[in-house]
Amino acid sequence: MGTLSPSAAALISKYGIAAVFAGTFIEGETVLLAAGIVAGAGLLNPLSVWASASLGAWAGHVFWFFAGRIFGNRYILPKSNWIRVRFAEVNRIVLERPKTAVFILQYLYGMRIIGAVAIGITEMSFRKFMLYEALNCMLWAALILGAGYILEESIMRIFHGWLAWLWLGVSVAAVILFIRHLERTLSRKRLK
């Protein structure tokens, strides 16, 4: 951290893991990949990043599962008979293969939130969803974090010297900009 200014080092140490949690709560492959790159450079603890990402993704999925459970039948599912027949088939598949349904939706880019809402509408028990999703989020976080970590090592080997530091600076700047954007968004919401 010696190459960073004290304020940047403070931002990363203060908000780095929180930014990973917030990003993965929402839908954070990109945030987690960037955190993996930063962790590969030694600026974040990889185990802390993994734990924060696992917990953030799991909390987000549980939130969206409950949204589907509470509002799904009333507002999400149209009253069309065709949709109900199709949804009955989806419900049957989810109940027959709950682990597969939860695990597959985690890795379809852009489907994590929609998948959690859809599973919330089905008859899958909350306990099963929590367990399968916890295991799934831990595996997902390890894979994406590992990819970012390896990517950082590859980039450092390829670019050597000043270009490696430039890449590191761009990565750190991206994390700092994300944190500042998050702070501004939260402060605007507090003012309302």
Image: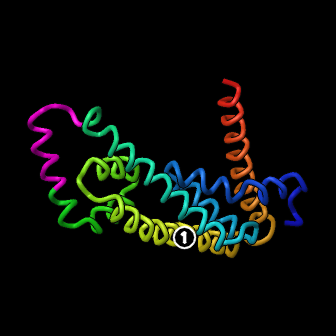
In the rendering, at what x and y percent does residue 89 appear?
Answer: 12, 52
Q: Residue at x 64, y 66 (%)?
A: 49
In the rendering, at what x and y percent does residue 33 appear?
Answer: 57, 61
Compared across the picture, whether 120 is left or right of 63 comes to left
Between 159 and 113, the residue placed more toward the observer is 113
* Residue 154 found in image quarter: bottom right
Range covered by the magenta-colored residues: 77-91
Residue 35 is inside the magenta segment: no
Q: Residue at x 9, y 35 (%)?
A: 81
Q: Residue at x 28, y 62 (%)?
A: 101
Check disc 1 and report its element: helix, strand or loop: helix
Between 143 and 124, the residue placed more toward the observer is 124
**Looking at the picture, does residue 137 appear above or below residue 169?**
below
Q: Quadrant of the N terminus?
A: bottom right
Q: Which residue is mark 1?
A: 147
**Looking at the picture, does residue 98 appear above or below residue 69?**
below
Q: Amino acid at mark 1?
A: Ala
Residue 80 is inside the magenta segment: yes
**Looking at the picture, does residue 92 appear above or below residue 192?**
below
Q: Quadrant of the C terminus?
A: top right
Between 12 and 163, the residue placed more toward the observer is 12
In the rendering, at what x and y percent does residue 64 appear?
Answer: 41, 47
